[in-house]
Amino acid sequence: MDWAITGGQVLRDGRLEVGALRLAEGRVAPDGVGGRGFDARGLLVLPGLVDIHGDAHERCLQPRPGIGFAPRLALRDAATQLLGLGITTAYLGITLSWEPGLRSLESWRGLMAALEAARPAIDLRVHLRFEADNLAALPDALADIAAGRVHLVGFNDHTPAILKKLGNPKEVAKYAGRAGLAPEAFIALAEDVAARRPEVPEARARLAAAAAARDLPMLSHDDASPADRALFRGLGARICEFPMAEAVAEAARAAGDAVVMGAPNVVRGGSHLGWASAAPLAERGLVTVLASDYHWPALLEAPFAMARRGRMSLAEAWALVSANPAAAAGLEDRGSLTPGQRGDVVVVDPAGPAVVAVFCGGALAHLGAGGAARLV
């Protein structure tokens, strides 16, 4: 079905102006008439949100430590939540770790199978967050990359931080609960994993080569220094995700890398870990992409929070959550409302902000409060 979305403020060419948007054959069409109508008066008509890293699906899989649900159910509910928040392209940040339980190889395999069977309205993609020390899972990761089941490769390395916390019973209990192990067993496992640390560089190189062979975008996570960023750039990772210091973001941008930080950081007014604050870095051009990280609703809220700060317009801030992440991920067919682009559109009531309607691939995929009354 073709659509004519009329009367709203449409984001085009970096400006919000009252006009009409036509969707035909799944794409943004040139101006014209025809199609079923949607009355967007008083609303914003924006490119769909592109989430380059969101791992809130973990709470659909395991809402409480040790309490799990089938991947099929988790993905169904995750897709529903994402749609309701205007996210039309979602890279699920799936961690493949040496830890048992939620982030295990078994869980990874279950999610891969469920994704193959799923037919969600939104474009669900896989951001493989590969833990550096997970050497036993490397064959699965390489096979899934080669088979086209992975769309973004992330180099993670949380093991050193975990090892530093093994003397803290509270922290050990958190990790052990997520893994479904007794604290003593988790400590023993972590120490065994650390013993194979010298094998990590070769495994990283193999992972990078596999991603390059499929022309997949790569990113490094939690770079602590410009040297870290340079190391991963040398492997082909041109996205710097969650730099731990301003100097890292500066080095990344100087080299032309995309820099990702969390939308929750913007909405909450700073990092919950005490790291760099995303909003001022975005205003200086040092952060180019915002991702939902652990909280999907923050991705919709963040551009409005940026605009309220008064240094970026809403149109400029929207690029952080749509055009820029699409470009960083190599998705040239989305992120704007120019003719020929994929028909991914979110219609937003700015008073909330609240999602009134979502179109995915030119099809109406979600109606929020009051949305049905606007169909004409």
Image (tube, rainbow, N blue to C red):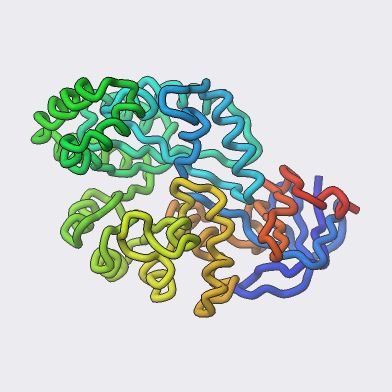
Q: Is residue 172 left or right of residue 333?
A: left
Which quadrant of the structure image shows residue 226? Answer: bottom left
Residue 209 lies, in percent from the top left, at 26, 40
Residue lying farthest right? 376
Residue lying farthest bottom? 311
Quarter placement of the N terminus: top right
Instruction: Answer yes or no: is residue 240 visible.
Output: no
- The residue located at (21%, 43%) in the rendering is 161
- The residue located at (58%, 57%) in the rendering is 300
Residue lying farthest front? 169
Q: How many marks?
A: 0
- In this rendered view, identify the residue nearer to me: 223 or 360: 223
Instruction: Answer yes or no: is residue 363 visible.
Output: yes
Which quadrant of the structure image shows residue 365? Answer: top right
- In this rendered view, identify the residue nearer to me: 78 or 187: 187
Residue 268 lies, in percent from the top left, at 47, 60
Q: Is residue 229 left or right of residue 1?
A: left
- In this rendered view, identify the residue nearer to me: 138 or 351: 351
User: From what the image shows, is residue 366 above or below residue 288?
Assistant: above
Residue 93 lies, in percent from the top left, at 42, 40
- The residue located at (38%, 44%) in the rendering is 216
- The residue located at (18%, 35%) in the rendering is 166
Q: Is residue 10 left or right of residue 239?
A: right
Which quadrant of the structure image shows residue 355? Answer: bottom right
Residue 83 lies, in percent from the top left, at 64, 44
User: From what the image shows, is residue 180 above or below residue 15?
Assistant: above
